[in-house]
Image: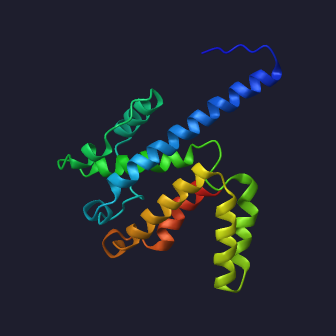
Amino acid sequence: YMFAANSQLEMENWIRALKRGVFVRRVSVCMMALPALSNEHVLSLEGIFRLAGDRGLTKELENGIDKASFPDFAALLNDHGSSGNVHCVADVMKRSLKLMNEPLIAFSYCQSAIAVDYDNSEEVRIQKLRSLIERIPHLNRTLLEELFRFLNFAMRFSSLSKMTSNNLAIVFAPNVLR
């Protein structure tokens, strides 16, 4: 596509609007994938979130999403013939987080988020994190809260999946905070 603008400001407004649309689409993908992945069978699979799904299917799903054709993640996961679908859905969700123009915890909050770890008091760290999360944009905060609830639930199955809190942090932190 080619866009024309009458001024630099108009062009910048178009670019901001397009970036916002891409961000909203990626948030939508995550919000649709999280409930589909939130079950014992899926979260008990060893390697969930670490093992890659079929690259061809993952790419096909992403191409559809780019054309505003969102997959039925629950139907994909109900296809009992292939546990690979689970890994594809997980890949699409992780990639949606990774490919956001700006992470859920925006660049401007990155140093504040990292600095929280250096406080000695757990109570102070929790208060600082709450304060930080309250300042991030509403849509980012909503997805972040849902993602944290999901990851907390996923940890219940870590004895089977091997996805401990540390492993989940290794997988998800780089996509949430950059």
20 over 159 or under it: above or below: above
Figure check: 142 above or below 149 = above
Q: Residue at x 53, y 49 (%)?
A: 97
**Which residue occupies the extreme left position in the image?**
81
On screen, residue 92 versus residue 115, left or right, reads left
**Residue 60 drawn at (x, y percent):** 37, 33
**Relative vertical location of residue 148 with respect to residue 63 in this rendering, above or below:** below
Residue 110 position within the rendered picture, expressed as x and y whole percent measured from the top left: 72, 60
Quadrant (top left/top right/bottom left/bottom right) for the C terminus: bottom right
In the image shown, does 156 or 24 lie closer to the viewer?
24
Q: Nearer the viewer, residue 143 or 161?
A: 143
Q: Image check: 173 left or right of 117?
A: left
Left or right of 137, for residue 84: left
Residue 116, image x and y in percent? 71, 73
Q: Is residue 52 visible?
A: no
Seen at 37% across and 73% down, the residue is: 158
Q: Please state the horizontal and vertical placement of residue 4, each as a whole percent of the image.
A: 71, 13
Residue at 64%, 69% (x, y): give it: 130
- State which quadrant residue 18 falls in: top right
Residue that appears at 18% across and 50% down:
80
Identify the residue at the far bottom of this view. Answer: 121
Residue furthest right as drawn:
8
The N terminus sits in image quarter:
top right
Is residue 172 visible in the rendered structure shown here?
yes
